[in-house]
Image (cartoon, rainbow, N blue to C red):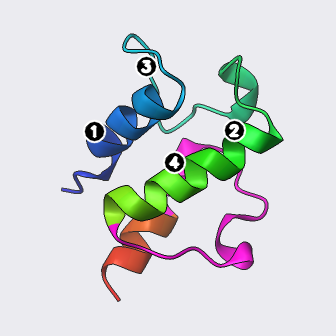
């Protein structure tokens, strides 16, 4: 089983400076108050650092929810 989601919770909490933030695979940008376009870039950079991956624009363009982000991270980690 992937450890990506629990680790991603920690990344989100650091980026959004909210130790109580809960995310699930169904979480979207619309469900996190401070998740705007600028925070999205900050979040993607934090994910790259935390997971040792490098996103391409096509990897993260059009992501619908955290579940899709987990899928992208898992795919990149197995390369």
Q: Which residue shows up at 78% across the image and 59% down it?
A: 62
* Pointer 4 or 3: first along the chain: 3
Give whichever of 41, 71 is nearer the camera: 41
Res 6 label: 1
Q: Which residue shows up at 40% across the image and 61% down it?
A: 49
Q: Which residue shows up at 42% across the image and 73% down it?
A: 53
Name the residue carrying label 2: 39
Badge 4 marks a residue whose secondary structure is helix
Q: Nearer the viewer, mark 3 or mark 2?
A: 2
Q: Residues within 10 Å of mark 2 (few under 14, many from 20)?
A: some
Quadrant in which residue 30 is drawn:
top right
Where is residue 13 drawn, in percent x and y? 42, 26
Q: Quadrant of the N terminus?
A: bottom left
Give whichever of 6, 40 is nearer the camera: 40
Name the residue carrying label 4: 67
Q: On the rendered structure, is 18 left or right of 6?
A: right
Quadrant in which residue 56 is drawn:
bottom right
Name the residue carrying label 3: 22
Quadrant in which residue 32 is drawn:
top right
Q: What is the spatial separation of the Cα atoms under label 3 and label 2, in whole angstroms? A: 17 Å
Above or below, comparing residue 32 to residue 70 in the picture: above
Badge 3 marks a residue whose secondary structure is loop
* Pointer 4 or 2: first along the chain: 2
Badge 1 marks a residue whose secondary structure is helix
Q: What is the spatial separation of the Cα atoms under label 1 and label 2, in whole angstroms? A: 20 Å
Q: Are marks 4 and 2 in contact (CB under 8 Å)?
A: no
Q: Residues within 10 Å of mark 1 (few under 14, many from 20)?
A: few
* Pointer 1 or 3: first along the chain: 1
């Amino acid at each position: 089983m992937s450890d990506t989601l629990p680790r991603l919770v920690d990344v989100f909490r650091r980026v959004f400076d909210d130790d109580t933030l809960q995310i699930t695979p169904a979480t979207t940008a619309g469900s996190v108050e401070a998740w705007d376009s600028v925070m999205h870039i900050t979040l993607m950079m934090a994910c790259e650092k935390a997971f040792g991956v490098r996103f391409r624009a096509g990897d993260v363009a059009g992501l619908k929810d955290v579940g899709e982000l987990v899928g992208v991270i898992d795919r990149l980690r197995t390369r």
